[in-house]
Image (cartoon, helix red, strand yellow):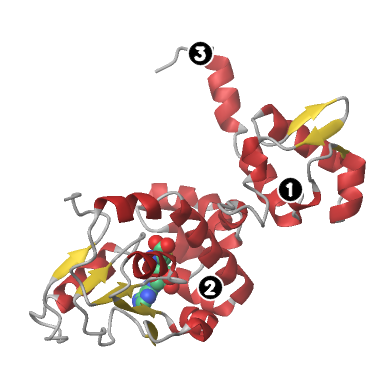
Amino acid sequence: MVETNPFATVQQIAGGYCLPRCLHVVADLGVADALDETPRTAADLAASVGAHPDALSRVLRLLAAHGVFATQDDQFSHSPASRLLRTDHPQSMRAFAQMFGLPVFWETFDALDHSVRTGLPAAAKVFPEGFWSYFAQHPEAGRVFNAAMNAKAHGAVAGILATYDFSGFGLIGDIGGGSGHLLHAILDAVPAATGVLFDLPHVIEDVASLASERLTFQSGDFFCDALPSCDAYLLYGDHSRLGRRRVRRDTQGDTLGCPAARQRVADRDDRPR
Ligand SMILES: C[S@@+](CC[C@H](N)C(=O)[O-])C[C@H]1O[C@@H](n2cnc3c(N)ncnc32)[C@H](O)[C@@H]1O
């Protein structure tokens, strides 16, 4: 561990939430989209995104001190990290930054003391209807979450395709696949394969128009509904442990049906071959 001044350590950690909060707000406002290759003043940017000039300037200066945007002579320009906040960046992380500012995340962490005192999930106290119901009831937040999952996958999909050979499978099921970014990439890489994306109804509604001969959609709840019968199953992402166990049990055909499903469960825990 790097030795630092202990006062500075406590000071930085105690106020550490300011920095991510600035990132969330700037991502929400779309400041990176308002900045191209020409440096601009904070006042100019504030006018473009509907913000207060001085307040935005303070936020941008803090972010620039941490490598998000660069600043010189009262002008702001892009840094490599702030470019990732642009919506049109091919590996955009804007939605990922926004996701952590959503009430369902932020307010849950605000209630962390409840978890630490009781051992119970803070999320269940703050959003008793549950994480996924929250997204079903707040479609805009749900879209940010799904876009964030897509953004997160930018850094991982190439590695998954490089280390796992999917060519032996005919029909591949992506269980809790979100908007299907991993499945799309696999189908692009394995032209002989077809896919079925399984997720909750509000998620499937948003992507169903992308159905094709090679890609079908099935909505349902992986805790209680029958899963599609496939040759391989993807369980990619942070599904709950219970959900992963249920899907594994079901797709191996031992107690919960789906008897034709038999082969392998390909997920991020698998060792590369
Ligand atoms: C953490 S996201 C992962 C999305 C995607 N697989 C990825 O990694 O980018 C979990 C996904 O599981 C879905 N999900 C959660 N509970 C579910 C359930 N009971 N039945 C079906 N899908 C569920 C969510 O809607 C969400 O799309």
Tell me which amino acid carries mark 3.
Answer: Thr
Q: Residue at x 26, y 85 (%)?
A: 228
Q: What numbered label is drawn on residue 135?
A: 2
Q: What numbered label is drawn on residue 32?
A: 1
Badge 2 element: helix
Which mark's residue is nearer the viewer, 2 or 1?
A: 1
C-alpha distance separating marks 2 and 3: 41 Å
- The mark that comes first in sequence, 2 or 1, is 1
Marks 1,3: beta carbons within 8 A: no
Tell me which amino acid carries mark 1.
Answer: Ala
Q: Residue at x 26, y 50 (%)?
A: 163
Tell me which amino acid carries mark 2.
Answer: Phe
| Image height of 83 relative to 150, above or below | above
The N terminus appears in which quarter of the rendering? Answer: top left
Residue 32: horizontal and vertical position, in percent?
73, 48
184 or 6: which is nearer to us? 184
C-alpha distance separating marks 1 and 3: 33 Å
